[in-house]
Amino acid sequence: AIVDFMAGAFIRCTRNSDIILLALDDVQWMDEMSWKVVQAIFERGKNVLIICGSRPPSTNPLSVDSSFWASLQREYKDNHRFSEIDLNPFNILDVKEMIANSLDLKVTEVDCNFAQNVFNTSGGMPHFLSYMLDSIKRNNLTARLENGLVGLKSSTGKEKTEFESVNELLLYRLDSLDASVRSVLHLAAVMGTEFELLDAALAYEGVFCVKETEKLEAAMALRDSLDLAVQEGIIEELFVGGEENNNDEEVLEEDYDHGASLGDVYFALTGRKSHPLYADNRRY
């Protein structure tokens, strides 16, 4: 009954739309009841495109009903209502081609040891590969080698050029940031999984005892540091353009119960409306 209710509610709420995209990732972790809801939407829905992502079912069995899975593999596939796509990691040749495209080179100019190192570090996963190549390009870690090909700079220099894992690469990118940016990231970490630029600025002023005459300069520096973190892919910007709450003018600041805890210290985040960043607030 609950399955029919949930599927029916979804279908009723979306029936006036031309098409609905239902995207589900890591469905190997979905429980049997959730699969039944998806099955009901698939069988009863008229305008729903369902895209599911999972690890290989051969090694990560799905909790989907066996008869429904068999129907997907047979009649639904024959009727072009179901298709299965295997996305495998890149092989070494794919990695070499992506290196060439990223660095504006010919494939024949890419050193084999360079390609092998990138392949081993990324595991051939496109997302990690793209992230790694972006870091290599951003930090100018390549050079023309004695053999005439392009490879990583010598790791005997100041810059590290060989990484054992993507996690090590992430740490390298963090360590490469300016100390002021890392301080801002430490502050952001204690603000929570989501925070507003305005609240971060108020907390920053409390932590570093910013003088009244220096608030604007400190606020701009904080915003620039967070913008750099967004560019590096460390945090994500969710909202730009001032306060989202249109009724904020009705809230008295002395009654605005909002703050941030840093260890045993609590900072009351007051003074929002008079702050230089009030009109340019953002959410991360």
Image: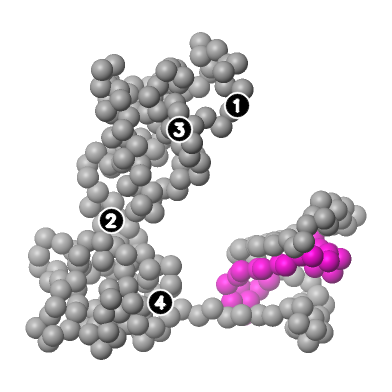
> Is 173 displayed left or right of 14 in the figure?
left
Residue at 12% over, 87% down = 147
Mark 2 touching mark 1, by CB under 8 A? no
Q: Nearer the viewer, mark 4 or mark 3?
A: 3
Q: Which mark is residue 124?
A: 4
Q: Nearer the viewer, mark 3 or mark 2?
A: 3
> Is 169 displayed left or right of 62 in the figure?
left
Q: Which residue is mark 1?
A: 246
Mark sitting earlier along the chain (2/1):
2
SS assignment at label 3: loop
Which residues, given as a range, are shown in magenta?
Answer: 36-62
Q: CA distance from mark 4 to mark 2?
A: 20 Å
Q: CA distance from mark 3 to mark 1?
A: 13 Å
Q: CA distance from mark 4 to mark 1?
A: 47 Å
Residue at 29% over, 16% down = 212
Q: Which residue is mark 3?
A: 281
Mark sitting earlier along the chain (3/2):
2
Q: Which residue is mark 2?
A: 173
The one nearer the camera, 138 or 85, is: 138
The one nearer the camera, 267 or 225, is: 225
Mark 4 touching mark 1, by CB under 8 A? no
Q: Image quarter for residue 131?
A: bottom left
Mark 3 touching mark 2, by CB under 8 A? no
Mark sitting earlier along the chain (4/1):
4
Q: How is the image coloured?
A: one colour
SS assignment at label 2: helix
The quarter of the image holding the N terminus is bottom right
Q: Nearer the viewer, mark 4 or mark 1?
A: 1
Mark sitting earlier along the chain (3/1):
1
Query: Is 53 a magenta residue?
Result: yes
